[in-house]
Image: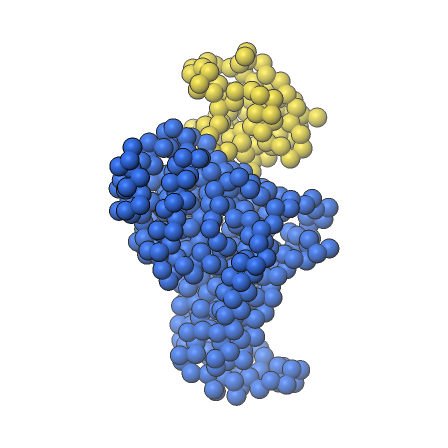
Amino acid sequence: MVKYLRFMSVYLFALATVSGILLGGAWMWLGFAVIYAVMILGDEFLGDYFEEPGYEHPRLLNSLLYFTLPTLFLLGLAMAWMAGSGDLFGLGAWVQANLGVDLFARREATMAWHWLGGILSSGITFAALGTNVGHELTHRTTDRGAMVTGRWLLAVTFDAEFSIEHVYGHHRRLATTADPASARRGEHFYAFLRRSLVGQTRSAFALENQRLQTLGHGTWSLHNRYLRGWLMSAAIVGAFAFAGGASAVIVFVLSALAGRSVLEAVNYFEHYGLIREPGQPVEPRHSWNSNKRLSNVVLFNLARHSHHHAEGDAQFWQLRSYRDAPTLPYGYLTCMLLVYLVPGWYRNRMSPLLLEWDRRYASAGERRLAEAANRASGVPALQLAAQGH
Amino acid sequence: MEPFGWEFDVHAGQTILQAALAQGLPWPSRCRVGSCTTCRCRLIEGDVRALTDTSYVLSREQLEQRYVLACQSQPKGRVRVHLDRMKATLATDANGQAATTVD
């Protein structure tokens, strides 16, 4: 039973975020603080898990994914209620009657600057429940229900187009210079962030346009999944405007952008500096893998990334550990914090791992490309190694 | 390896490519996630369940000619497909016909 229930842990984090936002004031930091503290310490002390259990009831695991949508709705409601005025859906009266907490007083006591915590908490929660599960679901391209749910989950962070770019762009161009979502050697996180955001949206638009042309539809039609994705996000913004006015829209948009930046931080460290010859098969060595117990349990095995890219249609519960694949030095939230706060340090931290990758994993062709990439990286440790050849 | 007339079983949940590679057949493939189109083949008989939307990667002509991606196709019943070429390392321009059988 535990092997099923553990995948519910991400909902505990969502609960922390929702209650923190409703409690207002400094409590708004609750979700953010709990998520980072528990994940970083947990990955440090709970170590790895390599188990690959069979699951007799995959449907149970599958249904866990779909609770993210109502949970995010609840989070959105909490945000709009606290940022707006009045008593949206009678939430304030209900909480007062059933839980004895005076949300009106809490809202009164919440200053604009407290919302920094609220936005960071919501951002990371959007990413964990929305982006992460949206990713899992939109890989199921023939399952209509999964696609619709997944695209709404992604639309929360203005990224429904991820369902196009990720599957038909990123997976195909992985670890080559043509991929906007694969970080190059020496590339600083904030440089990558810009390149990735611009590159992915361009690529999604181009891919969708090409598909429409193939099918004989025009760009400006409702067949356009790229444009429909933006309409979905616009609808969410509209709902916030309706529910809580301008302040709710501001809070939501900033949270969505924070959530989107989490995705890009994860994109960054999942493939940083790895190299594949265009046209050669995608192998486990083209992703940074992690078997950290908590990262995987909370993120539905996302950290088992080597298998995900080598076999894109495997469900999260089927992902194997690939313990011999190139491995991240830390768990997901630890890497994320380092990438955000000390991107230069993180880049240097990865240099010896990249050089080991060149020696241990790279094919002959990749080694040649890697040498050129090391030389051009601007990172002294990598350049020094390239001179040694 | 004789490139023509391959006949093999595809288990439930398996793609044509997975089954072919499990047989050790030199079916051309690269990305295996439905993007690079290296494994494309033409449906002659029968139908498949496509795991990804091939209109992102195949041209209109190819779709009209019933090209599918072996790595993204689960046969619905017995299918016959035409493979334009074998794995590049073995032969470059052989024209062959491969038959797949499904239980």
Q: What letter labels the chain drawn in blue?
A: A
Residue A163 horizontal/vertical position (percent): 47, 49
Please, is residue A45 above or below residue A174 in the view?
below
The residue at 46%/16% (across/down) is: B90
* Residue A63 can be seen in this image: yes
Residue A203 horizontal/vertical position (percent): 36, 45
Question: Going by the picture, which residue comes out furthest to the front?
Answer: A388
Please, is residue A300 above or below residue A287 in the view?
below
Residue B52 horizontal/vertical position (percent): 52, 39
* Residue placed most toward the observer, A6 or A88: A6
Residue A167 horizontal/vertical position (percent): 47, 43
Would you identify the image quadrant in which residue B49 lies? top right
Quadrant, the C terminus of chain A = top left
Quadrant, the N terminus of chain A = bottom right
The residue at 35%/51% (across/down) is: A348
The residue at 58%/14% (across/down) is: B5
How many numbered dots are placed on residues in this image? 0
Rendering colour mode: by chain
The residue at 64%/44% (across/down) is: A52
* Residue A232 can be seen in this image: no
Please, is residue A368 above or below residue B3 in the view?
below
Would you identify the image quadrant in which residue A260 lies? bottom left
Q: Is residue A187 left or right of residue B48?
A: left
Would you identify the image quadrant in which residue A278 lies? top left
Please, is residue B28 above or below residue A217 in the view?
above
Colour chain B is painted in: yellow
